[in-house]
Image: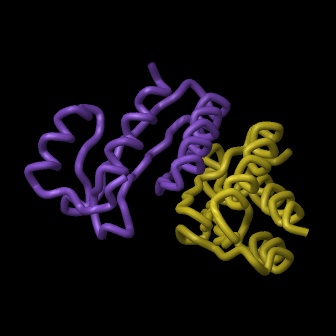
Chain colours: A purple, B yellow
């Protein structure tokens, strides 16, 4: 999978397919905030994301407190946003149906 | 278990028994940074902390990226640091032997 940083045009195109994610860090990352019923649901979700991350060898930066989870995706090797982040975001979104 | 905010004196006494944790947020929280070999070890640790948290109904604020985990403990009901945080920190430390 390409680890090249997306161009501004590519970024726009891909992001339009990810309406729940927003650009962060001057366009070098995308982020999404999630809210669940309680910690059990939030951490259950995190466990599923962790399995996806490990399988793809692409790991999120994330924060959790109780029922809230904030995920930031960026590709360190590319120095910004790459297709790996876009695909990971789609996999994460798919967990929530 | 008490959810009263610790006095400054109590805080000092308890914190001296937790040398790997430091005060944060003007003394209203404690935090510790952990570093593991890889994501698998870091998330394995987080899963164990999550089980402790759920059992004690006392949940951390935490951040993870790859092999790094940062945990902040505070007691929202007490508006600061309570004995619940101290005991939770000890349980977390105990996971690492």
Residue depicted at x 38% and y 68%: A76
Counting from the top left corner in percent of width and height, residue B25 is at: 53, 67
Q: Is residue A38 above or below residue A85?
A: above
Residue B17: percent from the left, percent from the top? 86, 76
Q: Quadrant of the C terminus of chain A?
A: top left
Q: Nearer the viewer, residue B30 or B46?
A: B46
- In this view, A10 is above or below A16: below
Q: How many marks?
A: 0
Q: Is residue A17 left or right of residue B39?
A: left
Q: Residue at x 26, y 55 (%)?
A: A24
Residue A91 occupies quadrant:
top left
| Residue closest to the far left | A9
Q: Quadrant of residue B10?
A: bottom right
Depicted B7 relative to depicted B78: above or below: below
Residue closest to the eye, B22 or A48: A48
Query: As rendered, which of B43 and B50 lies closer to the eye?
Result: B43
Taking the view exactly as shown, the residue that stands out farthest to the front is: A1
């Amino acid at each position: 999978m390409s680890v090249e940083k997306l161009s501004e045009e590519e970024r726009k195109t891909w992001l339009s397919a990810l309406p729940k994610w927003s650009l962060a860090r001057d366009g070098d990352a995308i982020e999404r905030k999630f809210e669940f019923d309680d910690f059990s649901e939030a951490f259950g979700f995190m466990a599923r994301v962790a399995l996806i991350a490990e399988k793809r060898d692409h790991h999120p930066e994330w924060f959790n407190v109780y029922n809230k989870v904030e995920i930031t995706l960026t590709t360190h090797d590319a120095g910004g946003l790459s297709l790996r982040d876009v695909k990971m975001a789609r996999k994460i979104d798919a967990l929530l149906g």
